[in-house]
Image (cartoon, coloured by chain):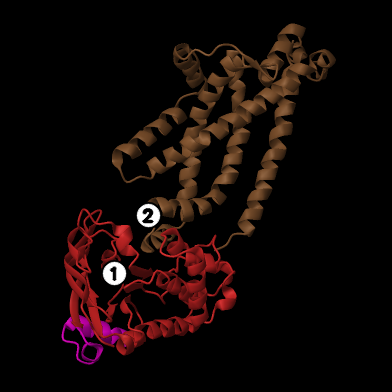
Amino acid sequence: MEIGHEIICAKNLGKVFDGNVKALTDCDLSIKAGEVVAIIGPSGSGKSTLLRCLNLMEIPTSGTILFNGVELTGKKVNIDEQRQKMGMVFQHFNLFPHKTVLQNIMLAPVTLKKRTKAEAKKKALELLERIGLSDKADTYPNMLSGGQKQRIAIIRALAMEPEVMLFDEPTSALDPEMVGEVLDLMRRLADLGMTMVVVTHEMGFAREVADRVIFMDEGKMIEENTPKELFEHPKNPRTQLFLSKVL
Amino acid sequence: MLYGLFDGMSPSNFFNFSFLPKYLSFFVQGVEYTLLLSVVSVAMAVLPALLLALMRLSKWKPVKWLSGAYIAVFRSTPLMVQLYIIYYGLFSVIKIQPYTIFGFIDISRFIPGVVALALNSSAYVAEIFRAGILAVDAGQMEAARSLGLSKFQGMKLIVLPQAIKNILPALANELVTMVKESSICSILGMAELIWGAKTVATTTYKTLSPYVLAAFIYFLINFPASKGIEAIERRMRRGDRA
């Protein structure tokens, strides 16, 4: 896929939680249009914090983030407006349990007046069709399997037609037999040219789908490279140690 | 001697309801007054309570503190004192002309009573709301915000509709409590159930049985109500959608 202009540019990102827990130190991150970037590393290394800083789910305590040239960390920015263009997928799906699948997908586009109800419904049904879950439109989330929930969470985010999708360990809460269907959907999304930042423990996915892999440890970006280079010739000893444990 | 000590508690004193034919209206109107007082007070408490709860959950310190202070004051002082202060303090400034509705409710007493009970109740209901909101998984608000919804939209469309399930049974329990607590209003001459019993007791010199009857009536209202709430709670929990 063609790699284009820079969509996200984060500089010197730092995050210190209450009680002086340093979650992130001096992270510089650049994401270009159409790029798939995987972030890997041991648990507690700050991968999720870095991802969650990108749409200000977590407010960084230092540094700047530019999204399409708009400084998200600036004072005057309307973060809600910017977030409409940044989809996010969570480890625990976070579907709205009191809404049907269709209502889950339609809620944001209709509430934020991006689309009329009829248009939103048409688009939602199209998306459901594409993931083969049309028959679940009027079902409540509790009736679905984990894999189905996560796929619906993904298209719920896609319904807003975001420019970038942020995935926060999307398969970590799934039973092993359901990981595949979610990764398949993400792979299709990548093939369609979606810009994606994926925090993941799925090394196979990172290796096959990502254009670039970032290894993090102790809140720092230790090493970043193409998957081939990073997995086959890791330069940093910490990366080597981590990969020797997980591969 | 010892036997004489328990004289007053003989069954004939407990269950002597010979006053009933003549004084029944005191109890009937008393129940109506009590129910009206409780329902109106709790209903009036709902909106201020929601506001207090949202303030308490706010990140903005002064707002959070203000709400916390209100809740602390109203929960840590006796309702009777609050009632006195509001009746003799606030409502000596705001004068309400005596006016009777439904034939037995004098609004110059009823309104101060409702205000005192509602102010008190809003502190308790605020905590019910707060607990109900906090019981909704934080991921729900995050998902809403990640789609571009504002905090207000997330609260209104996603969090509160889910919190209501936790809130409603507790709110119904607050009403049951209020039916009992509102008896305090008898000290200011509001013609609710205890006032009725007291009036009958002093007029007929039957010092025990009117109160026994009042207790029985309170029980008849509150016990089935509590059981009903429990049943609804159980049903809601079964229908929980994860």
Real-space Cα separation, disc 2 to disc 1, in angstroms: 20 Å
Asked if residue B41 lies left or right of residue B212, the reply is left
Q: Position of residue A159 (x, y in %)?
A: 43, 71
The chain letter corresponding to brown is B
Residue B135 visible in this rendered orientation of the protein:
no
What's under tag 1, amino acid-wise? Leu
Q: Residue at x 23, y 61 (%)?
A: A72
Q: Are marks 2 and 1 in contact (CB under 8 Å)?
A: no
What's under tag 2, amino acid-wise? Ser
Mark 1, other Cα within 10 Å: few <14 / some 14–19 / many ≥20: many
Residue sitting nearer the eye, A43 or A87: A87
Residue B121 visible in this rendered orientation of the protein:
yes
Residue B28 - label: none
Q: Which residue is mark 1?
A: A51
Q: Residue at x 79, y 14 (%)?
A: B23
Q: Specify whether residue B15 is painted magenta.
A: no
Relative to A10, residue A75 above or below: above
- Magenta region: A225-247
Residue sitting nearer the eye, B46 or B125: B46
The chain letter corresponding to red is A
